[in-house]
Amino acid sequence: MITLDSSALLAALDSRDHHHAAIVTAIDAEPGSLIVPVSILAEVAHFIERDLGQRALAGFIEDINASAYLLDCSDDGWLRVLELVRRYHDLPLGLADAAVIESAERHGGRVLTLDRRHFGVVEREGTVRVLP
């Protein structure tokens, strides 16, 4: 299982993104479910609509409807999200990144992201592993 951060998900959806091929290769190399925390959906949808347009947004929603992603909505994870936001306030680590980390911790620890700045700091704790 791989937990996707917004940056990786957006790069996977946008064939014009210069990280597209690497992200798709990383996804293909790690068979299993692609986990998307529900708390990042609005952020992802905003960037898809802004950068790729309504057709791409509709395609993303179709993918969700077809279960291309396992949507993760943990009622029990909010204390960990809060802990991460407080602990890494100096980055700052926001809600979206903290939710991705919390989700990854519950699903094997693998995170696919382009955000090495934030996730690299947390990776040193040993609770997540940034791919590839």
Image (cartoon, rainbow, N blue to C red):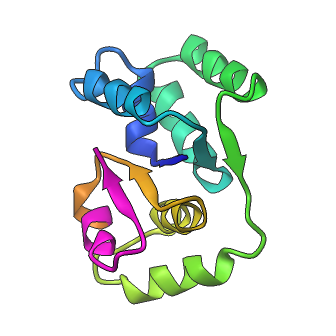
Q: Which residue is located at x 45 percent, y 23 percent?
A: 13
Foreground residue, 57 or 12?
A: 12
Foreground residue, 55 or 75?
A: 75
Identify the image quadrant of the C terminus.
top left
Residue 68 horizontal/vertical position (percent): 66, 27
Q: Which residue is located at x 70 percent, y 45 percent?
A: 71
Q: Is residue 132 left or right of residue 3?
A: left
Task: Give above or below for 124 relative to 61.
Answer: below
Q: Which residues are magenta?
A: 119-132
Residue 95 horizontal/vertical position (percent): 52, 67
Q: Which residue is located at x 59 percent, y 59 percent?
A: 107
Residue 89 horizontal/vertical position (percent): 37, 83
Magenta-drawn stretch contains 130:
yes
Task: Give above or below for 123 relative to 80.
Answer: above
Q: Is residue 13 left or right of residue 55?
A: left
Query: Exactly how many numbered labels are in the figure?
Result: 0
Task: Give above or below for 116 relative to 120.
Answer: above
Foreground residue, 44 or 5?
A: 5
